[in-house]
């Protein structure tokens, strides 16, 4: 009976769902397949308040349909550099390399806006001091990255305005990084990750950029000052069960710093930070940026 409805009515109904639901509807019937692929549906899934995109990011022929346009905007492998804070610097040997402060894409399942605050868009304590941090380019990153040489006071901070985010959406904050062989001091003591929401709520959790086991394998040496008591304490989670990083499909690591909810009427900055100020020297971390993307709760 539903399949007999006019296509425009089916399209109007599907436009009230999500991109994921529209794709699932294709399997219902031919009428649903035609409606689910219509421009009327996919135009509703592209937010009307997209931030300004940097010139040249969408070069090339225009997508033939609204669905193809959405798929381009939701290609997480190729996020779009934003015009906000863009720095232009020619790189003749790598024309794909981009310099900027933020990139964005759409979540393919929900259509919600996602962002990465690139390393240059973050406040990194001592980040402009060459003996502590070094800025470089990597073959597997389109964006400039920060390489930690050696610090005791480790602090990375970022912020984003709530109006840039999708409304009534739960977001998680992730630091995206690599830990090469020879890194040191990133497993213990734990770091403090915090998020300050628009409503004034402070979310704090203990995190470790590297597990003891991963550090031991990467270094391939015995660390003599790690006592049995230390190891036991670490494996018990320091009594606080710190959050550990996960490997991504793109070869980078990510660590969830916390989760917050962006309400309809929120109007202000969401701030987040990662802090570890013990006397332990930290070395080797490579920071690509901090991602803010939707997270399904429950």
Image: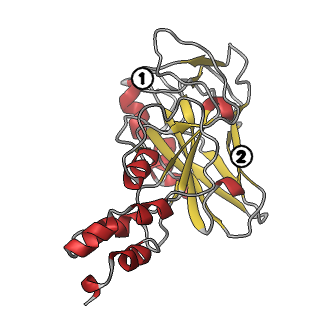
Q: How far separated are the C-alphas under marks 1 and 2?
A: 30 Å
Residue 179 percent coordinates (x, y): 47, 30
The residue located at (74%, 69%) in the rendering is 265
Residue at the far bottom: name it. 1
Whether pointer 1 and pointer 2 mark residues with C-beta atoms closer than 8 Å, the reply is: no
The residue located at (50%, 53%) in the rendering is 237
Residue 81 percent coordinates (x, y): 56, 35
Within 10 Å of disc 2 (Cα), the crowding (few <14, some 14-19, many 20+) is: some
Q: Is residue 154 visible?
A: no
The residue located at (44%, 71%) in the rendering is 15
User: Where does label 1 land, which residue?
Assistant: 181
Image quadrant assignment for residue 195: bottom right
Left or right: residue 238 versus residue 133 is: left
User: Camera-side residue: 181 or 35?
Assistant: 35
Residue 107 percent coordinates (x, y): 46, 55
The residue located at (60%, 18%) in the rendering is 135
User: Where does label 2 land, which residue?
Assistant: 159
Mark 1 or 2, closer to the camera = 2
Q: Label 2, secondary structure: give it.
A: strand
Left or right: residue 48 versus residue 11 is: right
Q: Is residue 200 visible?
A: yes
Image quadrant assignment for residue 37: bottom left
């Amino acid at each position: 009976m539903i399949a007999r409805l006019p296509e425009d009515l089916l399209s109007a109904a599907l436009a009230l769902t999500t991109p994921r639901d529209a794709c699932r509807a294709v399997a219902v019937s031919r009428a649903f397949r035609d409606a689910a692929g219509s421009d009327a549906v996919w135009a509703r899934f592209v937010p009307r308040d997209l931030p300004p995109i940097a010139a040249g990011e969408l070069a090339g022929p225009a997508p033939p349909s609204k669905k193809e346009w959405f798929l381009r905007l939701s290609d997480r492998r190729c996020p779009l550099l934003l015009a906000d804070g863009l720095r232009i610097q020619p790189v003749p040997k790598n024309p794909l390399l981009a310099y900027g402060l933020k990139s964005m894409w759409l979540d393919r399942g929900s259509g919600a806006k996602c962002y990465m605050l690139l390393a240059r868009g973050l406040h990194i304590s001592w980040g402009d001091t060459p003996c502590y941090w070094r800025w470089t380019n990597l073959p597997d990153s389109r964006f400039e990255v920060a390489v930690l040489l050696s610090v005791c006071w480790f602090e990375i901070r970022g912020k984003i305005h709530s109006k840039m985010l999708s409304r009534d959406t739960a977001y998680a904050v992730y630091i995206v990084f690599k830990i090469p062989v020879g890194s040191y001091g990133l497993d213990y003591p734990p770091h403090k990750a915090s998020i300050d929401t628009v409503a004034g709520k402070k979310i704090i959790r203990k995190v470790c950029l590297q597990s003891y086991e991963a550090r031991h394998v990467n270094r391939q040496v015995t660390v003599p000052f790690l006592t049995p008591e230390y190891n036991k304490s670490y494996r018990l989670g320091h009594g606080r069960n710190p959050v550990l990083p996960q490997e991504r499909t793109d070869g980078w690591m990510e660590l969830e710093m916390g989760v917050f909810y962006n309400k309809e009427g929120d109007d202000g900055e969401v701030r987040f930070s990662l802090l570890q100020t013990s006397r332990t020297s930290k070395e080797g971390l490579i920071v690509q940026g901090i991602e803010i993307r939707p997270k399904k709760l429950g």
